[in-house]
Image (tube, rainbow, N blue to C red):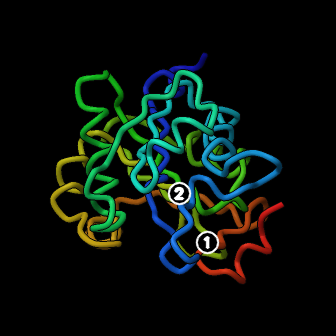
């Protein structure tokens, strides 16, 4: 296990209720024969994250029942309907006191981003001041790596569906961009038409 793997925790945001999918929780959408949340955890683990925290929200009880999430730390965001910002805050809160020096944040509804892209972002971690983002043809996207020194600032600005966007925009000059457009496709599974991306 490398030092990076010990110090960086994977954080999978999987609380969404799939409002535009007729209220089908995204974590439970089928992909390759298993719930999407399982696939997301597998990607983080394959990329080198030995510790993974998963933020659940919509249908959390059903997700616990149906998905095999092994030794992941499951974090329940009871106010998930407020948007991704609340899930990011809950996830970062759950990492406080664990010894993690950074969080590698990925989204459950982006299955086109596999282990290779996530490993590239993980590989750019230096210390708890690190801010790293995957980019696609130069455009910032997910996953993002947030050093612990930034967690309080991210949590203070993570509202609605914005997640870390406002914080990252304000600290653009500090972000290390890692091009991943050659190994990943950053689409979201948001609408019925997007379900075609699932296998």
Residue 71 shows which numbered tag? none
- Asked which secondary structure carries label 1, the reply is loop
- Give the CA separation, mark 2 to mark 1: 9 Å
Coordinates of residue 43 in the picture (x, y in percent) = 67, 42
Q: Residues within 10 Å of mark 2 (few under 14, many from 20)?
A: many
User: Which residue is found at the position 59% from the left and 62% from the top?
Assistant: 109
Query: On the image, numbered disc 2 is attached to which residue?
Result: 107
Image quadrant occupied by the C terminus: bottom right
Coordinates of residue 192 in the picture (x, y in percent) = 67, 80
Residue 57 or 159: which is nearer the viewer? Answer: 57
- Asked which secondary structure carries label 2, the reply is strand
Is there CB contact under 8 Å for labels 2 and 1?
yes
Residue 59 or 133: which is nearer the viewer? Answer: 59
User: Which residue is found at the position 24% from the left and 42% from the top?
Assistant: 149
Residue 189 or 63: which is nearer the viewer? Answer: 63
Q: Residues within 10 Å of mark 1 (few under 14, many from 20)?
A: some
Residue 17 vs 100, above or below: the answer is below
Residue 164 in sight from this viewpoint? no
How many callouts does the rendering have? Answer: 2
User: Which residue is found at the position 34% from the left and 42% from the top?
Assistant: 76
Residue 75 vs 153, above or below: the answer is above
Image quadrant occupied by the N terminus: top right
**Side (left or right) of 90 relative to 146:** left
Q: Upstream in the sequence, badge 2 or badge 1? A: 2
Coordinates of residue 52 in the picture (x, y in percent) = 50, 32
User: Which residue is found at the position 25% from the left and 63% from the top?
Assistant: 158
Residue 27 in sight from this viewpoint? yes
Residue 30 vs 46, above or below: the answer is below
Query: On the image, numbered disc 1 is attached to which residue?
Result: 188
**Side (left or right) of 42 relative to 57:** right
């Amino acid at each position: 296990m490398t030092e990076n793997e010990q110090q960086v925790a994977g954080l999978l945001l999987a609380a969404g209720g799939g409002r535009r999918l007729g209220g089908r929780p995204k974590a439970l959408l089928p992909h390759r024969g298993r719930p999407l949340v399982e696939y997301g955890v597998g990607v983080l683990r394959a990329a080198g994250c030995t510790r993974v925290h998963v933020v659940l929200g919509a249908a959390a009880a059903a997700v616990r029942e149906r998905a095999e999430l092994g030794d992941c730390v499951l974090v329940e965001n009871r106010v998930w309907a407020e948007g991704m910002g609340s899930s990011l805050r809950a996830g970062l809160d759950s990492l406080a006191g664990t010894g993690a020096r950074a969080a590698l944040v990925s989204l459950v509804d982006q299955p086109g981003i596999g282990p290779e892209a996530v490993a590239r972002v993980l590989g750019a971690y230096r210390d708890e001041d690190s801010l790293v983002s995957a980019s696609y043809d130069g455009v910032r996207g997910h996953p993002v790596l947030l050093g612990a020194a930034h967690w309080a600032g991210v949590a203070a600005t993570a509202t609605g569906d914005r997640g870390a966007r406002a914080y990252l925009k304000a600290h653009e000059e500090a972000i290390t961009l890692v091009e991943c457009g050659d190994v990943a496709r950053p689409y979201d599974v948001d609408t019925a038409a997007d379900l075609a991306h699932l296998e």
